[in-house]
Image: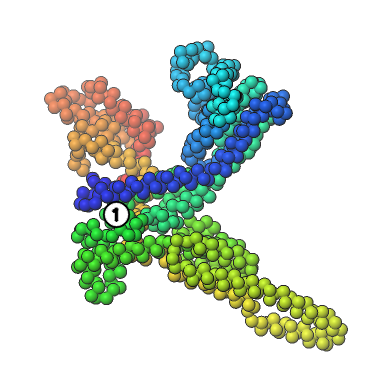
Amino acid sequence: FREGNNDSEDTDLRFVICQSLWKQVKSETEQIQEDLNKQLFDNLVSFLRRSHSEFQEKTTKWTCWMKSREIPTAALVLGVNVTDHDLTFRSLSEVLQNSITPYIALLEAKDCPGIKNLMQKLMGQLMNCSIDVNSLEDEDYLQVSQNRIRCSMTSLINWYESVTKKTDSETPSKKRTSSPRQWQSPPVVVIFKDMESFTTKVLQDFIVISSQHIHELPLVLIFGIATSPMIIHSLLPHSVSSLLCIELFQSLSCKDHLSTIIDKLLLTAQFPFKLGEKVLQVLINLFLYHDFSVQNFIKGFQLCIVEHFYSQPLSVLCCQLVDAKKKVNYFSHNQCENIRRLPSFRRYVESQASEKQIALLTVDDFLKETTQKLLEDLHVYHENYVSVLRCLHVLTSSLPKYPLGKQIRELHCACLENQVWETEEYESSLQLARMLNKSDLVTMLQRCVEIFVSSSGKEFGKTVEKLKEFLTQFQKLEAEAFQEQDVSVSSQKELQKTTDLYHLQKTLLELKESRRSKKLSKFEMLRSEVVDYIDSLVRSYLVPADHKTLHEVVYFNTASVLREHLNAAPRIALHTALNNPYCYLKNRALKSDGGSISNKAPDICIVYKLHLECGRLINLVDWLEAFSTVVMAAEGSNADGASSDQVDDIIHARFIRAVSELELLGFIKPSKQKTDHVARLTWGGC
């Protein structure tokens, strides 16, 4: 903060506010993830408790498992957002250790290329020790706690029996159920974090070996699956999969997870920091089209917080939105000038009377009072915006089609982008809403009443009364509908009694004509009135944020900066590092003029800048000679006797290594046209 904004006098305060907001976001997201995973973890704990109790009591079901050598297995489908799986498994491991068993091993495919490596990793984690795989002898022995223990299922069983007997002897029988470490025989849980990445042979061997000892070791497997449960039958033949007693567990969809995060972080007045439409769209697009990672979305959100407080001197006013009673009295004249430069504040000044314009532009005390009021108005706007947005989402989500999107985040982006009531999608939604049946309308109104009643906004008292009035009118219509139904039934009976063809035809024509000139029914008029009222709320409260004064204080809108941080540009980074190594190394000796080549730069940088001066084919001899000239320039007189035929062996080796590194990076390749040439692969500027 200090390096980037030396001219700002409240850098420390901005840093404190940013840090506090960062901690709040982190705490809130952790709580959200804990709440979302609670049902899943509870189901897994229940599954493990059943398997544990059945092993303890030797029930019929466990006896059947022993006879068929089936291993209790949980197939945990987590989705394709693989980068979020680590956090889920860490949380799951903590839950199981606190409630079920201390013996948990988390295995990854990269650490288990063979069954020997898998057993080493498994025993190492269960015994809570580190194993050096390189020091392992051919007899599969390793040093653990100064003892020679063989990595085999027999050794694992012997260790488990010794540990459980020791725990049993140290713990009184009355207290065995107080914690998992005091249970007589807690299960051994083996979690395969990325089952799809394990080789078939490793899984087969481990399952077959484990099934032969299931009567001695209460083993429970958990398969972490990113794709589909069918992968179990694709990886394992029937003879092996039949050894597993599989129960399926499904985690929450990553899209639903993201919607909850956005709902709790962005669609609330609790956090004063907000994302602009373009920035939010960048984060959502990265989520949808890159990795479906909720954790990466949260990191992007935290990056926006840092960037906003780093680049916006007036972001210190965010604390004003948290504490409305705090006065803006610590502002200096420079900070008042920063407010006057804001585009939204300029528009506000232009809309005022001439006397007030002069006061706002010249009197700092009057500006502070106005800023206080404008910030309070902005806070009220956020409270009202969220409530009306939720009400509009209730309406649009009850439609047969979703012109404005099914998720509330899509509706939020549409409202941030422009005046949503001027879009075609909004008009289509209203047309569909005017065709809803009574039950859907009543349900929608009831949910809207709940939203406005629980809202922190203070302007919705009359709104709640109006919505309740609509509900009362619908109830009256329902009573009238029964009476009209009785009248229509009696008229149909009279029509059936008419046997004369002339009178029958005349009656039918009259009915047809009455239907043509029929006015809207009471229900249709009431339905139209309800939709029009919701439309009036939208036009009043869902004004885009960039139309509000001082929105720059709260909203981060610099999408280009966010793209630079999040969108990988490896070629640009490579070109910058090789063409100007000072940019990354910060060594003053590497500073050079635009076109010059420093002889103190790394060899690959010298070779790269020389190759930029060449054409499609590069002569290696000429390239080496130019490289030698640049390098030897630093040695002065030592370079006078040098020639292309008598290049020093060390310089020659340095050149070969630099060219090989350049080829590895993809800038050149060997040429088939000329053996002493290489072909250049990159063109144009970065």
Q: Nearer the viewer, residue 645 or 84?
A: 84
Above or below: residue 117 compared with residue 196: above
Q: Nearer the viewer, residue 295 or 450?
A: 450
Above or below: residue 274 compared with residue 686: below
Provide the residue designation for mark 1: 316
- Position in image of residue 120 (x %, y %): 51, 21
**Residue at the image point whose x is 39% and y is 47% from the top:** 24
**Residue at the image point whose x is 21% and y is 43% from the top:** 594
Left or right side of 20 for 164: right
Above or below: residue 502 compared with residue 345: below
**Residue at the image point whose x is 44% and y is 70% from the top:** 540
Q: Nearer the viewer, residue 180 or 42?
A: 180
Q: Amino acid at mark 1?
A: Val
Report if residue 434 is visible in the image.
Answer: no
- Position in image of residue 285 (x %, y %): 45, 51
Report if residue 586 is visible in the image.
Answer: yes
